Amino acid sequence: AGIEPAADAGPVEPSPPVSPAPPALPVLPTGHPGAVPVAVPVPDEGAAATVAAAPQPSAALERILRGPSGLGTTSLHWARSDAPAVPAAPDAPARIPGNPIPGLYYHPVPEPDPVRVEELGRRIKAWALDEVSLYPEDWEDQFDGFSVGRYMVACHPDAPSIDHLMLATRLMVAENAVDDCYCEDHGGSPIGLGGRLLLAHTALDPVHTTKEYAPDWEASLLSDAPRRAYRSAMEYFLQATTPSQADRYRHDMARLHMGYLAEGAWAQTEYVPEVWEYLAMRQFNNFRPCPTITDSVGGYELPADLHAQPAMQRVIALAGNATTIVNDLYSYTKELASPGRHLNLPVVIAERESRSDREAYLKAVEVHNDLMRDFEAAAAELAVTCPVPSVQRFLRGVAVWVDGNHYWHQTNTYRYSLPDFW
Ligand SMILES: CC(C)=CCC/C(C)=C(\C)COP(=O)(O)OP(=O)(O)O
Ligand SMILES: [Mg+2]
């Protein structure tokens, strides 16, 4: 991961004052300079019926990708361009910084709104420095290089306001702080990871304990940068979401923490998993908590029983897996250069299937492409079988998150560079 907070995960340090309770989030655009009003792409009943009647998954997929159709819906096409998904040509001229991985199946996105990107960048830095003391000032370049504002604007083009975008952006920063500080090479280690993660998880899922012990737990939430970040980001999230949306997020974060633990355990014992085992671990150590808040950031709710449907769970898992293997591919050279052996899909394929680095990398691209195609087929099928407006919008929000995530990885040349395999 990438944002490098003050690496003080150990002993309790003097705490900054608890930030005030966040205000309730307005659902409508706020009039803030960056609060660009957007049309909400919820199909009407007629449009939903059209989807329901569509016989072919491919037609439904196109429907999800294109958004609503019909009179007056032009403005509802909020992110995916009409450009087809492309296996990139190796010699295609670059229009934006960073080259896409040749042969990768992805959808280009429009450039994120620069006004929003700038305002979000300003506000997230203020939060990081003033509200949660996330990192020392001399780490500013790394924070800026992470470009979290550009990331979140690209992934949530339907957010009604900057306040909504801030929900996702705080959580993204906090999640990376925990990964960097607890798990990876900014003070992290597999040793003792379980205890650190569990205690950090209580910033998301509070401890209900006796009067005697509650103050110690409360104080612990301010005792290091990852916990301060989780606690504050979750407090804002709770103000803006329903109890079931918050509980969905907690569940996804418990999954993530379980994935960190498996990765850490394998690192500790120097175990190189089989490819399928690696993919299982990476389904948990995964971006999943980010696309699954797309409705919260969009200012609407996918009801809990619709979120829990097995077909929706499959769509979410496949989307999360595709986005996470994108990270393995774009961060490959960074991870090769890091100390020790950092597992990612190309590294595991090379080891377990006795392939050259290049062959293994190219096979990992194919694994990603299969996951993307399976995700899109599963989403299309669900759109046909469940023509409910919130489901349609959620599926589209997840698809757009997948595309925005690819865009961010491709264009973040501060963090990532491609290997020389073509
Ligand atoms: C934002 C979030 C939920 C992250 C959790 C898992 C995670 C850190 C990733 C999927 C990114 O993977 P990785 O740790 O390999 O990140 P970098 O390659 O260092 O960018
Ligand atoms: Mg990586």
Image: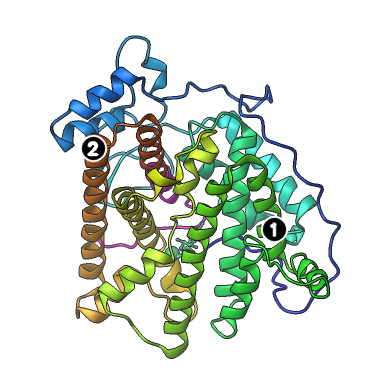
* Residue occupying image coordinates x 31% and y 68%: 279
Please state which amino acid type lies under the numbered disc 2. Answer: Thr
Q: Is residue 363 above or below residue 53?
A: below
Position of residue 125 relative to residue 197, above or below, is above
Determine the secondary structure under disc 2.
helix
The residue at which mark 2 appears reads as 385
Looking at the image, the residue that sits furthest to the front is: 210
Tell me the residue at 57%/50% (across/down).
246
Packing grade of label 1 (10 A; few <14, some 14-19, many >=20) is: many
- Residue 212 within the magenta-colored segment of the rendering: no
What residue span does the magenta drawing correspond to? 403-422
Residue receiving disc 1 = 231
Q: Secondary structure at mark 1?
A: helix
- State the separation of the CA atoms marked 2 and 1: 38 Å
Which one is closest to the eye, mark 2 or mark 1? 2
Q: Nearer the viewer, residue 324 or 138?
A: 324
Q: Quadrant of the C terminus?
A: bottom left
Percent position of residue 250, x then y: 54, 58
Mark positioned earlier in the residue sequence (2 or 1): 1
